[in-house]
Amino acid sequence: MRNLIITQTIGEGHNFIARAIESALTLRGEECRVIQLFGYSEKEVARQNNLFLNAIKFFPHVYEYFWEKLRERKSEVPNFFIKRVIKKCSKYLLKEISEYSPDKIICTHNNAGAIISYFKKNNKISPFIKTFGIATDFCAYPGWESCVNLDYLFTPHLFTNKEYIEKGFKETQLLAYGIPVAPKFFYYNSKSGCRKFLNLPKDKFTISIVGGGNCLTKASSLLKQILKSCFDIQIVVVTGKNEKEYLAVEKIIKKYNTKNVLNIGFCDCMEKVYTASDLIFTRAGGSTISEQITKQVPIVFRENLIINERINKKLFVSLGAGVSMGKISDAAKILQDVLKNRNLLKNIKNCQKTLKQENSTFNIADFIIKTS
């Protein structure tokens, strides 16, 4: 069977999910092809990503205003932004679908889901092609109301389904299989083995600061705050593709003349970083949270998050599956509490177990394969 996976570079989360599904399907012997929503032009792919990143970085209030307004919509008629996406991408996607002739289409972004839903409603693609969406946050993101003509939508958890039903999905379309993560996150790694891999002492309390793929929340500023407090710990810093942040962390290491900080730029072994960590400071994107609770690492959600991340953060903190930072100076108090009372970490892990979706990626892949 041929599986066409459509993703969109809006940060890296949706791409991670696309690759996770591709990997799981390939391991099952399926044929896959992954394409970008704006893949007719590499420049346009980059431009769309930069528009998103600049909006949340420089105009967060404007971004949140439109996000909230559009989230209130219940009509499947595409909103203004999705209409523009349909206009720009329809010709390219129809060409890709015609040439590849897929049996299944999987959409890892609501924009892609909206176009495929539009194609299905207007008989622009074969009715025999089975179509799937993958929701990537623990809240219903604006735009999914325009995806109701997809055959199925994979959701993060049963408690999220209510929002999607309110947006027009039928209960039979919704499959609460979890947000897919790369298969490597399901495999067991020992803490001591991962610390050895990272060249870290095996017996020292370890925290990780993860800035996300673009490090929109500065890792360097948090590192400085923690080093000022002189805790007897070791620290792993992941700055992603942000070279400026990487260099800023290097500068801090030299300033404090510290030997207990490992500075990593882009990292393709996050499953080992998570396993090596006793505590992680992070943003709150849906795919990132899913990776972390799969590896059972206690989470501290950082400050200054975008609106969907704040919703994710509020949910997980309310369920006891993470700790909240309201401001960067909270880090020292959180670390102090954790180091004095290790049961706090144990309690977080126990709460995470109730939210963890076992083998989400393989379960999604198996359902896609058997659907005809």
Image: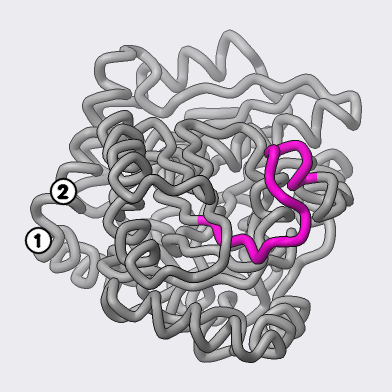
What percent of the width, then of the height, locates residue 138? 52, 70
SS type, badge 1: helix
Whether residues under marks 1 and 2 lie with C-beta atoms below 8 angstroms apart, the answer is yes
Seen from the viewer's position, the closer of residues 247 and 150 is 247
Q: Which residue is mark 2?
A: 55
What percent of the width, then of the height, locates residue 307? 29, 68
Residue depicted at 60% across the width and 68% down the height:
279
- Say if the magenta span includes residue 152: no
Segment colored magenta: 194-208
Quadrant position of residue 98: top right
Left or right relative to 44: residue 249: right
SS type, badge 2: helix
Furthest toward the top, the residue is 99
Instruction: Say if 216 sits above or below 354 in the image.
Output: above
> Label 2 neighbourhood size at 10 Å, few (<14), some (14-19), many (20+)?
some
Left or right relative to 197: residue 266: left
Residue depicted at 51% across the width and 46% down the height:
259
Callout 1 amino acid: Val
Callout 2 amino acid: Ala
Q: CA distance from mark 1 to mark 2?
A: 8 Å
Quadrant position of residue 277: bottom right
Mark yes or no: residue 174 visible: no
Seen from the viewer's position, the closer of residues 355 and 280 is 280
Mark yes or no: residue 327 visible: yes
Residue depicted at 77% across the width and 54% down the height:
202
What percent of the width, then of the height, locates residue 298? 63, 72
Seen from the viewer's position, the closer of residues 140 and 241 is 241
Q: How is the image coloured?
A: one colour
Instruction: Say if 220 sits above or below 6 in the image.
Output: below
Quadrant containing the C terminus in the rendered view: top right
Q: Which mark is residue 110?
A: none
Q: Which residue is mark 1?
A: 62
